[in-house]
Amino acid sequence: RVLSQNRQQMLENWLKEDKLECSEELGDMVINTDAKMALSIYLRANVPEKVVQCFMLNGDYQNIVAYSVKVGYQPDYILMLQNLVRQNPKAAEEFAKSLVNNEGGQLVDVAMVVDVFMQLNRIQETTSFLLDALRRNRAEEGHLQTRLLEINLLG
């Protein structure tokens, strides 16, 4: 009822004063009007899938991996990239680079990421991503180096 009366400030105050029990259901009610507030609710309610969803909605891609590692959640990064590349290809490219260059080890398969970008014929993002992912110039990545050349010669 508070949301339907456009009184998000009241809801925000109740959250700050710990007068509400945070739950997935409450977050679901709030997410369409205020994704940042929904994020706060999902964090307090410990709903990792929805927290990651809010990070995506808010464009906070850099927080996804750190949060997921912290709480032991395994997001479907390839599915996330598939959705993101349609909405914001440049952000998808940067997110993919961060997944491949993750400190704790690579979180996605490079070839799968290439497939995601190429399904939408995103040659520029694919090239930039591959140049970054292949910068170590390892022999076992030869097939990906060949694919990079093919994409740019045939694209």
Image: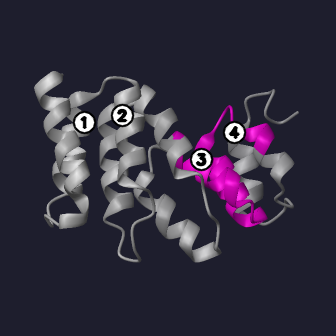
The region drawn magenta spans 28-57
* Residue 127 located within the stretch drawn in magenta: no
Distance, label 2 to label 1, CA atoms, is 7 Å
- Position of residue 64 measured from the top left corner of the image (x, y, whole percent): 50, 59
Residue type at numbered disc 1: Glu
Q: Which residue is mark 4?
A: 31
Determine which of the numbered discs, if any, sits on residue 150 in the image: none
Residue sitting at x 25%, y 50%: 143
Q: Are marks 4 and 3 in contact (CB under 8 Å)?
A: yes
Residue sitting at x 64%, y 73%: 72
Helix, strand or loop at mark 2:
helix
Quadrant hosting residue 88: top left
Q: Earlier in the sequence, mark 4 or mark 2?
A: 4
Determine which of the numbered discs, if any, sits on residue 54 in the image: 3
- Position of residue 79 measured from the top left corner of the image (x, y, whole percent): 56, 42
Task: Kindly report which numbered mark, 4 or 2, lies closer to the viewer in this rendering.
Answer: 2
